[in-house]
Amino acid sequence: MTTTLVRPQPMKTIHSYHVKDHSLAEQGKLKAQWAEREMPVLSQIRERFSKEKPLRGLTLGACLHVTAETANLMLTLKAGGAKVGLCASNPLSTQDDVAAYLAKGAGVSVYAIKGEDRKTYYNHIHSILAMLPQITMDDGADLISTIHNQGTNTDRILGGTEETTTGVIRLRAMEKDGALHYPIIAVNDAQTKHFFDNRYGTGQSTIDGILRCTNLLLAGKTVVVSGYGWCGRGVALRAKGLGARVIVTEINPIKALEAAMDGYWVLPMNEAAQHGDLFITVTGDVAVLDKDHFSKMKDGAILSNSGHFNVEINLEALKKLSKSTRKVREYVEEYTLKNGRRVFVLGEGRLINLAAAEGHPASVMDMSFANQALSAEYLVEHGRELARKVYSVPQPIDEEIARLKLKSMGIAVDTLTPEQQKYLTSWEEGT
Ligand code: ADE
């Protein structure tokens, strides 16, 4: 199978699990199997797919973070009969051992290597496009925007799926401009996706990434969380749980109010900048931490981002304010400002949960990727009936995933009695 995984040993990734007796691909396989233990919903879908082959004869091109959890999604799509190609959706998020396993041991065409430069990143996207996929699967919309920018004929494409908030925002903008060439299912908008993946997945894995590369004690620290969407809510909750004093910054009055009533200190960034020991951006927007903020920060402030793109911390402005930079630890860059203070940037401002840790835990990716697999099946069945729009995951799919997840957790729920059902559908007297 195709692979661009030709990295000389020793590996410089953080994924050194001391599994000395296994090759890189074997290590990746063990990792994928470990994740699979926490992915019972996807496993059930995989079993059904291997019997029914709903994706038979189809080529599916995916641009996703190449992780152990993604490996299980790729195996599910293959089990469904698809020919599958995978490239990275971020230059720093690839787990090379997983990529090696998928390429060498699982029959997936993989184009991804951790730390790839921008040119290689886009070459890899083009390699997926050369496979002429009929379904695209994105995390951040780089695959689909490349297709649209190069003016490719998209007649063969049934549709695409999008995993993340940032990608959905880009795709809705394309729809609004009449620029979208084929239908998209916004997996991110499924409740079984963002309630869990964005909140608990980002919440835990962001803190995980920060702790792995800094070994910081959060208790007693002031943590500034910028953005109080589902991801920000999760990050703030977990930082608070570890004893930090949490400040939230927001632009949306309703979310700011929610943050205040959730017990956080809400401030504009211009004020928060002077208080923070650790800053975590999760807004999806540019220059959230900018020139004026850097100048106000305390000596030793740590800056990190968990939004999809590395645009939230204005590194160009930070460089201009600095007299020197140096790497002080893996994923930690020290900037010494002309005012003599130092600030530390984690993981080049890229999403720290995937750069310095392993991304969201498998248990939440189980639901996100169940949505992906079932959305791909839905596109095979209905893609040709859909308009060039961004669609939600059909409600029955969303609810079925929740039911299966509950069952796998051994949790039973009640059902309405006929009397209760009737009450809810009648508009007569309430008493
Ligand atoms: N996005 C966030 N966490 C992820 C993971 N573990 N695998 C794939 N994509 C992710």
Image (cartoon, grey):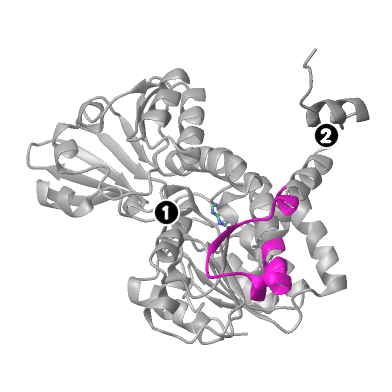
Q: Mark 1 Cα within 10 Å, few/some/many (few <14, many 20+)?
A: many
Element class at badge 2: loop
Nearer the N terminus, badge 2 or badge 1?
A: 1
Asked whether residue 188 is in view, the answer is yes
Q: What's the mark number on residue 230?
A: none
Magenta segment, which residues? 374-398
Q: Can you tell me which quadrant of the image ligand 1 is in?
A: bottom right
Q: What's the mark number on residue 411?
A: 2
Q: Nearer the viewer, residue 366 or 170?
A: 170
- Quarter of the picture containing the N terminus is bottom right
Image point (83%, 71%), residue name: 50
- Quarter of the picture containing the C terminus is top right
Q: Nearer the viewer, residue 184 or 355?
A: 184
Q: Which residue is mark 1?
A: 308
Element class at badge 1: loop
Answer whether residue 173 is magenta in the image.
no
Q: Nearer the viewer, residue 87 or 172?
A: 172
